[in-house]
Image (cartoon, rainbow, N blue to C red):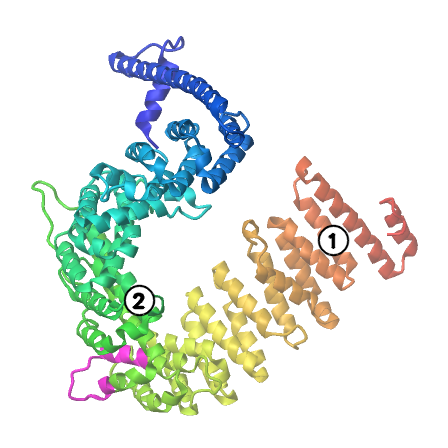
Amino acid sequence: MNLRWIFSEFLSQHCQGCPHHSPAGDPSWGNEIIASQRKAVEAREGKEADETARISELRANLADQSTQIGEMASPETRELIQFLEQLFSEDASKRAAASQRLVESASLAPELFPDASVTLLITLASTDDHAELTLPTCIALARASQSVRAAMLPMATANIERGFYTELTAELVDALGDTVQYPLSDTLIDSLIRTQHDDMAFLLWHRSSPSYQWHLNALQRSYDADQESVRQAFRLGLQNLDDRTRIRYCGALKRLQRSRPSIAVDLIESIAQSLCLFETNDSGSNTPSAEIVGVLQHAFKFAPDQVDEELASTFAGSRPAVKEDIIRVYSDLLDWDDEKTKEVDDIARSQQIAFGRLFDWVKDDTLELDLRGEAAEALENAASHRPVVISEKFDAILGYLALIVAIKEPPEPPPKIIIPGESEDPRLAGLQAHGRKREWLMLKDRLIRCLKHLTEQQSSVHFDTVAGCLQNRDANVGAELKAVCMTLLGTIGENYQLRSKALPLLMKGLMDYESVWVRGHAIDATCEMFRYSKSPPPSNIIDIMNVHLRDTYTMVHKAAVEVVSRGPRWFDEDQALDAMTALATHLKVYKDDPIQLESICEAILGLARQHDGLMHIAIGLVKSTLPTGESRPDQKIIANLVRTCPPNSPIAGVVSILIAEFLARVRSRRLNGYEHDRKRMFQWLHSLPPRTYQHISNQLLNAAREMAVHDPWETTHFASLFSHFGDFAKENSILDTVRNAIRDEPRHQEFRDDLLKLATVAKGNACLRTGDVDLAMATFASQGDPQS
C-alpha cells in the first residue's frame, strides 16, 4: 500500500472546494499537492488527445498508401493489399485472420509484396495498434527475402531500444541474419536484458513463464562475438539499486548461463556484490537475492573452487541476511541429484566443497547461532535425502558432536555496538539468553538427526564407529555422548542382521546406573529398534523395562511408560500384570498431571487389549483417573476406552457410564465440525446388548438431561439411543427437555416444532409399548397422522 499516492489522490478529489469543512491550519502544503495533481491530469489528458490525433492521421495516410499500391499491382498483389486493408478493420477476428494470411504469403511468395507494401508493413510494425499484427509478417519476409532486410534493420533496432515488442523484434533481428552486426550496441544489449520481465513472474502463476527464446538468442550471438560487451552490461545492471531491475538482470543471466556457463563464473565478483545490496522486500518471495542464489548454484557446479572462494570472502564481511542467502546456495547443492546432471563432471567436487564449507560454519563459534543452525539444518537435509554425499563425513560429525554435546551453555554472542546512555532492558536480555539456549539445543539436535539419518540409510557402514565409541574404555566418553550413541544404536538395530550385535551394547546402556541420561536413551532406543519388527524384544529386556517402570528418576520411568504404550504386544501375561501394577502406582503419583495420566492410561489399556484377563483391572484403574481436570486428555482416554472394550464385554456397563458422564460434562467443539471421537462414542453406545442397557438406562437419562442444559442439539443423539432400545418413555422425556432448553425464538421455531412432533410420536410409541392402544392412536391423531 502506497499511502503517499492514496493521500494525494484523496486530497485532490475530496478536499478541493469542499463545502463541508474548512482548513484547521496552514493549507499551503495541501494546495501545492492539489495544484501538482491538476497539472499532471492536464498533461495526461493532453498527451492522450495528441496520441489519438496521431493515430487517426496515421490510419488515414496508411489507407491512402494502400489504395495507391492497389492501382499499380497485379491480381495476386491486390489480394495482399486487401489483407493489408483488413488490418485496419474494427473486427479483431478479421485483423487476426488477415495477419495470418500475410504471414503465410510472405513465407511462400515474398516477391508478391511490392516495395510500397513493405514500407507500409515497416511503418505499422512501430505503431502500438498494429505492431503485434505486422511484425510476424516482417519476420517471414526477412527469412524469405534478403532484399528487404536492410530496410527493416532501423525499425528493429528502434523497437528494441525503446523496449517495444522486444521478443518479436528480437526474432526479427535473428531473421535479418548477416545484416545485423554482432555484438549489438550497448544500448540494444541493455534493452534486451531489461525487457525480460522476471519481476512480474508472480502475475504469471496461472501459466508457464515466458522463455524469451529470441532475447536469449541475440544475447548469445553478441556474447560469442564479444564476451566483454555482454559482461559489462550485466556488471552495471547487477549493481542497480532498484530491486525489479536487478531481478530482470538476474533472470536474464540465469537463462544465458545455461548455454554459456562461463559468464556467471566471470561475473562472480559482481554477482556477490549484488547479493550484498539492500532490498525493499515489497515483492514477496520474488526478490533479487532469490534469483542470485539460483545463479550462484548453477555457477558453483561448473567452477566450484572459484565460486566457493568468492562466496567465503563475501560471507566473512556481510550482514546476517546475506549470510543466510549464501548458506542457502550451499544447502541446495548438497541436495542436488546426480542423475539429472550427468553432463556436469565436477558435481561431486562441488558437493564435497559445499559440505566442508557448511561444516566449517557449523563449528564457527564466532557466528550467530541461528546461522550455525541453518548450516546444520542443511547437513541434516542432505543426510536425509542424499546420504551418499556426506556418508564418509560421519566420523567428523560424530567427533564434533562429542566435543559440544556435554556443553550446556551456548557460546557468547558476537560483540555489538553499545550506544552511550542507552541501557538494555533486563527482561529483553533474559529473553535473548533463553532464545540462545534454545538455538544451541536445536543445533545439537540437528547434528544428532543428521547422524541418525545416515545410520538409517547405511547402518552396516557406521555400526563399527558407534560400537567402537561405546566400547573404547581408554577414551573419556561422557554420558551425553553415550546417550547419543544409544540413540544411533536404536536406529542401527532396526536392521535385523545387525540387531544381534547391537543388543549387547543396548543391554549395557539399559543397566548403566551411573547415568540417568544413558538409561533413558537406551529405553527409547529399544522402542525404536523393535517398532517395525514382527518379533518382540528378548524377554529379559522386557523384565528390565518393568524394573525401569519403578525407577525413581522421571526421565527413566516416563521412557519405560512410552515403551509399554508403543509395544504392549511385547509383554506376556505375567509381565503385563507386573507392568500394570507399576503403572497403577504412577496413576497416584501423577494424579495432578492430566497429560501424563493420558499416557499412563494408554499404556494400561494397551496391555488390556493384548490380555483379556486384565480388562477388569485396566478399566478399574482408568476409571479412578476420570475426570482428569482437562477436557482433551479426558476425551483421548475415553476414546481409547471405546477402542479397547467391546460393547458385549461384561464390564461394558462401567465403560458406558464413563462415556455418558464424559459426553455430559465436556462440550462438543461444533464450530470445528462434529468430532469423530464423540460420534464413535454414541455408535458404541448403540451397540450395547439390551441387558446392559437396562442396567444403565437411568444413568444415561441423567447424563442426557445434564447435556441438554448446555448442548440441546447433541442431546438428540441420546434420544436416538433411547429410541434404538425401544425405551420410548425416556425418548419422550429427553425430547421434551431438549425442546424446553431451546430458546423460544423465531430462528429456532422450526427445530422446536420438529422436536414436538418427535416427542409426540415417542409418547405414542410408549403407549403402544404399555398396551394402551387408544391413547396411542389419540396421541398420533393429535399430529394429524393417525398412521404414524
Q: Residue 749's quadrant in the figure? A: top right
**Where is residue 599 drawn, in percent x and y?**
45, 71
Gap between marks 1 and 2 measured at Cα: 80 Å
Element assignment for label 1? helix
**Where is residue 328 drawn, in percent x and y?**
26, 58
Label 2 environment density (alpha carbons within 10 Å; few <14, some 14–19, many ≥20)? few
Q: Residue 330's quadrant in the figure? A: bottom left
Q: Residue at x 36, y 48 (%)?
A: 213
* Residue nearest the viewer, comparing 252 with 135: 135
* Residue nearest the viewer, comparing 203 with 17: 203
Determine which residue is flagged by label 2: 343
Q: Residue at x 28, y 72 (%)?
A: 389
| 476 in the magenta segment | yes
| 620 in the magenta segment | no
Residue 434 at least partly seen: no
Q: Residue at x 90, y 49 (%)?
A: 786
Task: Spot the residue most to the right.
Answer: 774
Q: Nearer the viewer, mark 1 or mark 2?
A: 2
User: Please, is residue 563 above or below residue 771 in the view?
Assistant: below
Q: Which residues are magenta?
A: 468-489
Determine which residue is flagged by label 1: 733
Q: Do the residues bearing badges 1 and 2 touch, measured as CB atoms within 8 Å?
A: no
Which comes sooner in the sequence, label 1 or label 2? 2
User: Please, is residue 549 above or below residue 23 in the view?
Assistant: below
Instruction: Specify the amino acid type for callout 1.
Output: Ser
Residue 180 at least partly seen: yes
